[in-house]
Image (spheres, helix red, strand yellow):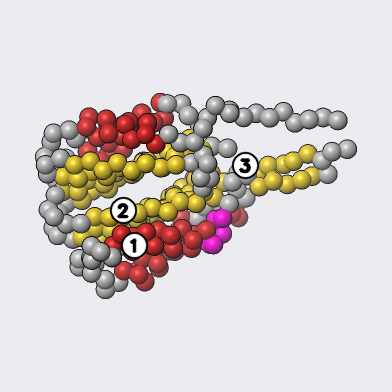
């Protein structure tokens, strides 16, 4: 008799998103990498890219590896200009969520926005 | 011996970023168009752009979850960089970023589309 497959389409309550934990991950990494730094146009592209990678990896390893993750980092120079950022999402409010953090120092501001969406199916074979 | 029936919408390919690009550009033009940067209106603009983009994308009826972000920045010579890193299914999911500017401001809109199941 063939066994049937069971798919997990929603995360377990233990593995459910915890925005507070993710916000803390983001905050730690950003403060560690950006404190005391000046805005250097040559460095910033690489810095923002590597920040996004590090944050994505840290969140993945914090127990959210079954989730798809989208991490966006925005770094800007402070020259008195006005900046406004907005975001909106179309997703499943039961499983998906986001966490964000804003870091400002004398010459730069950095806004990090990280979204989890969709638990990945985990396949179980039952006999 | 029983066989499982497969339900899959084989016609859906990966995310079409050119189409999304066109939709986003149209939405930005529609909301901000020829206006000059204004501190009092910027809230309304970013909210409007994001709302419009999301509505138009969802209207396409594809099986995707969407995340839309928009940054509007006044032109003063300051620099701005955005970067993103995503952990997803590269065959089905995708993103598109549109940079738009007029005489007094920059607008950067990012759309992330994540396939559902």
Most frequent secondary structure within the magenta stretch: loop
* Left or right for A106, reference A99: left
For marks 1 and 3, give the CA distance: 36 Å
Tell me whether marks 3 and 2 sit on the same chain.
no
Q: Position of residue A87 (x, y in %)?
A: 34, 44
Discs 2/1, front:
1
The x and y percentages for residue B12 are 52, 30
The residue lying at 24 percent from left, 55 percent from top is B80
- Confirm whether the magenta stretch covers residue A85: no
| Residue, disc 1 | A46
Instruction: Give SS at disc 3.
Output: loop
| Position of A33 relative to B28 (above/below) | below
| Contact (Cβ within 8 Å) of mark 3 with mark 2 | no
Chain of the residue where label 2 is placed in the rendered structure: B
For disc 1, the neighbor class at 10 Å (few under 14, some 14 to 19, many from 20) is few
Q: Residue tagged by mark 3?
A: A9
Rendered location of residue B114, percent (x, y): 48, 41
Let me know if residue B36 appears in the view.
Answer: yes
Of the 4 image quadrants, the one containing the N terminus of chain A is: top right
Q: Which residues are magenta?
A: A61-65
Residue B106: image location, x then y, percent: 19, 45
Chain letter of disc 1? A
Residue picked out by circle 2:
B82
């Amino acid at each position: 008799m063939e066994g049937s497959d069971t798919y997990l389409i929603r995360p377990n309550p233990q593995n459910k998103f915890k925005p507070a934990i993710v916000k803390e991950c983001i905050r730690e990494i950003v403060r560690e990498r950006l404190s005391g730094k000046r805005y250097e146009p040559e460095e910033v592209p690489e810095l923002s890219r590597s920040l996004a990678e590090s944050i994505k990896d840290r969140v993945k390893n914090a127990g959210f590896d079954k989730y798809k993750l989208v991490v966006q980092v925005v770094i800007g120079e402070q020259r008195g200009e006005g900046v406004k950022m907005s975001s909106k999402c179309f997703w499943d409010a039961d499983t998906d969520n986001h966490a964000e953090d804003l870091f400002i120092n004398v010459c730069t501001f950095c806004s990090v926005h990280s979204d989890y969406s969709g638990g990945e199916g985990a396949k179980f074979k039952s006999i | 011996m029983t066989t499982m029936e497969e339900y899959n919408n084989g016609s859906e390919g990966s995310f079409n970023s050119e189409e999304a690009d066109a939709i986003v550009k149209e939405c930005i033009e529609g909301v901000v168009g020829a206006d000059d940067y204004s501190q009092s209106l910027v809230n309304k603009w970013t909210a409007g752009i994001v709302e419009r983009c999301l509505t138009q994308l969802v209207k396409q009826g594809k099986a995707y979850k969407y995340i839309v972000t928009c940054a509007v920045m006044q032109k003063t010579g300051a620099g701005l960089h955005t970067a993103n890193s995503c952990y997803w299914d590269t065959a089905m999911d995708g993103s598109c970023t549109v940079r738009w500017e007029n005489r007094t401001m920059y607008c950067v809109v990012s759309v992330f589309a994540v396939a559902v199941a």
